[in-house]
Image (cartoon, rainbow, N blue to C red):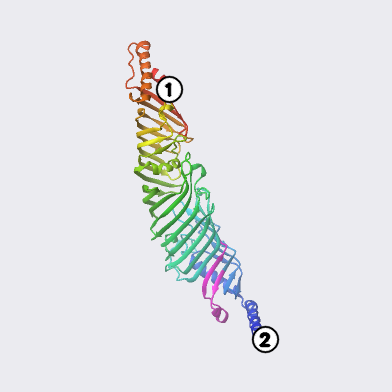
Amino acid sequence: MKKRWVKVAVAIAAVFLLVVIVVPLLVNADTFRPRIETELSAALGRQVTLGHLSLSLLSGSLVAREISIADDAAFSASPFLEAKSLHIGVELGPLLFHRQLRVTRFLVDSPAIQLIHAANGKWNFSSIGEASTASTGAKQPTALPDLTVAELQIKDGKATVSSLPATGKPFVYSGINLTIRNLSFTRSFPFELAAKLPGNGSLQLKGDAGPLAQKDAADTPFRATLDLKQFNPVAAGVIDADKGISMVVDTTAQVASDGSNLTSSGKVQAANLQLSRTGSPAPHPVNIDYEVANNLEARTGQVKDLAIHTGAVAVHVNGGFRMTPQNVLLDLHLAAPNLPIDQVEELLPTVGVRLPSGSSLHGGTLTANLAITGPATATTIAGPVEIDNTQLAGFDLGSKIQGIHAAGSGGGTAIQTVRTNVNSSPQTTQFTNIYAAVPQIGTATGSGTVSPAGELNFNLVASFSATSGVGAIAGQAVSAVNSLIGGFLHPNAKPTQNNSIPLTITGTASNPSIRANLGAMLR
């Protein structure tokens, strides 16, 4: 009995193998190629070319050796999509017995896709779904075909994103895996997309899209969840390394478009954040919550809120932006009211603000109201900044002033107030209307600059307090100068008042050189 069942199983297997081998030889699947090319071309509004078609009973599909989809002639003469093979899932019964073609799915293997963005905001896939007028070659909107496919898959694809005219290095997505179920031009459908980004980043997008926008396919509404991992904009070629901006980003966000407006909100964790040529990466990841709205037609947007978290506080940014072929132009406002310095100190190096080596700020608050304008990769930051009631531990300012030979207290420097107007651009950082009140010394006013290389050039006038040790020594220097002026240089010369001495600060923020310029008093 057992041997009989073995023989039956072998016979069934032999018949199945015979069918799999023989039937495809008897069915000339390539006869369906012109029909499939015609129907796909009509549905996409693009010329579709297939290679030789064969039948695979194991996968239940017609297999084209290659596929090519033409691009919009206004963008490129090269194909929009090329792939090594296309698997067209079909219902085998109607195909074999009635020669009816009922397509159930498409599988595109290892395609190369060219995505081109024009200066006017149009994409080369915007015209997909339009019919071509044979006589003029012009694109005219037409009724979308009621095409429904149970599943469309792209496996291991590559997409190159470029601009027309070229404005930078193309961006390449690799390892693209896309699954669309119940694909329809006239109804919404679920999709899942995964891709690898340059620099070891990865992207996942999952949601619903459709129906396809007839006027511009790029305006097709969708709603999705975005997961972005280990995205490095410098390694990806999005930001040039010489801009001084770098980070490694993880993002979880909700993204939605109604065809006219795109909204996005989510959370960003930026590791190794650096925002200035003279800056250095933040020692810990920086968390950012954001909410952004974008008008797709006007190519303008609104940052409703961007909260940069450090410790238990947040710096808030809002304003607008405008997208151009060359860059994103910003018009933003940053508000940092009375933030505890202890919680924001580690962010200062990211924007190029450094403290003298071995020093740190303890206690006090920082307040800033800054305008952030210009191209996103070369912004200008301007506005008032103020620090109150802090202690610069590890740096005794009194002992660092060369030229008056003052002994320091050794306990650091107490700062009552430092305020200034900042104007920072890629060319230089300017500080104007500086006012500093340091009880150990007195007050100082003036202005200065910091070069892109971090070199200091400040000219201040310090009014030393007579009750401080440094002030007493400064007073002696002033008195000596007054004696020279009053009794030696000119009988009508006026002596200096209020123990005021010019100060120059050079060197770098990490290693400043502070000098009392008594020579300037004499001159």
**Quadrant assignment, res 396:** top left
Per the rendering, the mark at residue 3 is: 2
Q: Is residue 252 magenta?
A: no
Looking at the image, is mark 1 or mark 2 earlier in the sequence?
A: 2
Name the residue: 36% across, 44% down.
Answer: 334
Q: Which sits in the foreground, 300 or 359?
A: 359
Q: Is residue 299 visible?
A: no
Quadrant containing the C terminus is: top left
Give the magenta part as a residue range. 87-112
Q: Position of residue 64 (x, y in %)?
A: 59, 69
Q: Which sits in the foreground, 508 or 213?
A: 508
Crowding around mark 1 (Cα neighbors within 10 Å: few <14, some 14 to 19, many 20+) is some
For this view, does 351 lie left or right of residue 111? left
Q: Secondary structure at mark 1?
A: loop
Is 22 situated above or below 392?
below
Q: Disc 1 versus disc 2: distance between alpha carbons?
A: 110 Å
Q: Position of residue 73 (x, y in %)?
A: 51, 58
Q: Is residue 111 magenta?
A: yes
Name the residue: 37% across, 48% down.
Answer: 312
Q: Which sits in the foreground, 47 or 206?
A: 206
